[in-house]
Every structure is written in C-alpha cells, then in structure tokens.
Image (cartoon, rainbow, N blue to C red):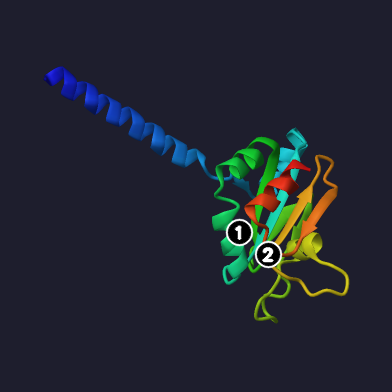
Amino acid sequence: MKQSLFLITLLVLLFSSEEIKAQKTEAINWVTFEQLNDSLSVKPKKVVLFFYADWCVYCKKMEQAAFKKPEIIQKINSGFYAVKFNTETTQAVVFDGVIFNNTEAKTKRNPVHDIATLFASREEVPFSLPATIFLDKDFAVTHRVFEYISPKKMMELLNN
C-alpha cells in the first residue's frame, strides 16, 4: 500500500512539474531594442517588432490570441528576435548608436515614441495600432501590418 501511494505521489509530482515547466516556456522571449541591437551583432536573425499601447483593445486581443498560441511562440522563439514596445513610453531608447525619445510626450494625449514612428509610420496615414513589422535577417522590412493579426494570419506571416 505504501509503495502504491509513493508511486502515485511521484507520478503526480512528475506530471505537475512538467506542466509547470511547459507553462513557463510557453511565452515569447521578448527583447528590448538595446538587446536586439546586441543580438543582431552576434547572430543575425529575422525580427518581429510589435508596437502597442495599454489602451489598444486590438493589441490586447493579439497578445491573448496570437502571442499565446504554442505554435506561434515556438516559431518566434526559434527563428526570430521579438521586440514588444509600448509606443507611449517616455524612456529613451538607444538603438544602432542613436538615442530615440518620445518627443510627443509633453504635447499629445497619446504620444508616439520616435522609434515607433521610425519603424511603423506611413506616408500621409496617421500612426495606428497595433503595428507589427516583420524584418528579414538583413533587417529589411518584409511585411508591415497595421491591424489586428489573427493567429492563422500570424503563422502565415512568420512562415514567409
């Protein structure tokens, strides 16, 4: 009886620790622009830039739908550097030797950081969120999407 109880307890602990381990690894390894700069200099890789704001409903929906899918997490973590950036932050960002600031922070209600403007602006179209930019390993833009991306569409973009 004691051996059966011990075996059952051992199995429960083993499976629960595997489940906890799986939950911990089921997240995208987001990096900052500074970390991206360092990583690209060591090992070039494709890049996903996700620009969001705390008030953006579609940004939150993408985080819950697309960025929580195990297959998308695995694809991004294995083949991409991923940057998630709040466009309203007021902190300076150093990228590629240039300091970027949020110059709109004191003058606009929903200010857009200069680095977000650099990567995610369009001619004659106001800045909009969510903005997701896909770059190849040479840091050339392959896709720019300025709307909610479904998990299916996200996987298609990642596979291109």
Q: Position of residue 143 (x, y in %)?
A: 81, 53
CA neighbours of label 2 inside 10 A, class few (<14), some (14 to 19), many (20+):
many
Q: Which residue is mark 1?
A: 62
Quadrant showing the C terminus: top right
Q: Secondary structure at mark 1?
A: helix
Which of the two discs, 2 and 1, sits closer to the camera?
1
Q: Position of residue 49 (x, y in %)?
A: 71, 53
Q: Secondary structure at mark 2?
A: loop
Instruction: Depth check: give the residue in front, 128 or 112.
Output: 128
Q: Residue at x 66, y 50 (%)?
A: 152
How much space separates mark 2 and mark 1, taking CA atoms? 8 Å
Disc 2, disc 1: CB below 8 Å? Answer: yes
Quadrant showing the N terminus: top left
Q: Which residue is mark 2?
A: 130
Q: Amino acid at mark 2?
A: Pro
Q: Residue at x 65, y 56 (%)?
A: 150
